[in-house]
Image (cartoon, rainbow, N blue to C red):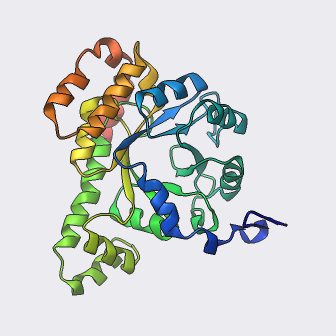
Amino acid sequence: MAEDGAVTLYNSIAITDAKTSPFSLKAGLTQILRGGAIVEVTNAEHAKIAEQAGACSLIVSDPSQQGISRMPDPSLIKEIKRVVSIPIMVRARVGHFVEAQILEAIGVDYIDESEAIALADEDNFINKHNFRCPFVCGCENLGEALSRVREGAAMIRIQGDLSGSGNVAKTVKNVRAVMGQIRILNNMDEDEVFAFSKTIRAPYDLVAQTKQMGRLPVVQFAAGGIVTPADAALMMQLGCDGVFLESEIFNCSDPYKRVRGIIQAVRHYNDPHVLVETSSGLGDSNANLNLSEDRIEQFAHESA
């Protein structure tokens, strides 16, 4: 049975005709998110606040799950789709192509194959070329980023700590790692690119394309610990195209003001006068976004 170009061949893990969904089209759909902030929401009320504050997209998560975290309940996704008009992104577990099939059937705009929730397959990622929907994938270095692009990711999320700690240090470290590897690549002779691609375990053609473009061949956002306008502007000045904001951003007295301030910082990241304005008056908004003593001790051990 085929409908709207979809071919139901679940036994071969192919549910769409790749010829009708070229990668360039999916990459183009992620380009519209450049220069924006993607906000994680857990209910319709937060979704409305994020949309009013100027979010370019929403990523839906389910806070009620206990134990292993999975794809959100489809009813929650549908409820949020009804109340907002901006694109919706939803997480699926790494390697869980059936969750991705469900999300595509619901009609989400983007699928995030995310390590922020439990892994369904420890060895294999989803073959994203088999889907009409653009995929977002995470990375901590250039090799991971280009490997995910080869699998069909149309957008890369350079990620740090995704536990909601409010600590941006790991995100900065990984963004600098990716950008630093790209700068090293840009200064290489053509003959050195072959060896470099083997070193970082990435496809040679994508490494060569990255060298030619001077950046990743797809949109690159930063995620993890970004809770202030200054954090967001830092990511943009380091070379990212946008940021992800975690749902903890709503744990303050005036979430609209904070989200709006961060979005303005993303749009005007090189204007210190705007950054002063967006960072002012947040007051107790920072109170619930600090690390606990246990989390501080954990970060101390990780950096040791």
Image location (x, y in percent) of residue 97 = 66, 58
**Residue name at image x 28 percent, y 30 percent:** 229
Q: Is residue 118 visible?
A: no
Image location (x, y in percent) of residue 48 = 53, 26
Q: Above or below — where is 237 with respect to 297?
A: below
In the rendered structure, the answer to whether residue 155 lies left or right of residue 141 reads right
Q: Is residue 225 visible?
A: yes
Q: Above or below — where is 36 with respect to 152?
A: above
Q: Residue furthest right?
A: 1
Q: Could you say which quadrant of the image residue 297 lies in? A: top left
Q: Could you say which quadrant of the image residue 224 lies in? A: top left
In the rendered structure, the answer to whether residue 186 lies left or right of residue 97 reads left
Image location (x, y in percent) of residue 296 = 32, 29
Q: Residue furthest bottom?
A: 191
**Residue name at image x 72 percent, y 34 percent:** 75
In the rendered structure, the answer to whether residue 212 lies left or right of residue 87 reads left
Q: Nearer the viewer, residue 66 or 15?
A: 15
**Residue name at image x 34 percent, y 35 percent:** 226
Q: Nearer the viewer, residue 54 or 128?
A: 54
Q: Nearer the viewer, residue 97 or 268?
A: 268
Image location (x, y in percent) of residue 8 = 79, 66
Q: Above or below — where is 49 with respect to 304?
A: above
- For the C terminus, the image quarter is top left
Q: Above or below — where is 137 with respect to 247?
A: below
**Residue name at image x 30 percent, y 32 percent:** 264
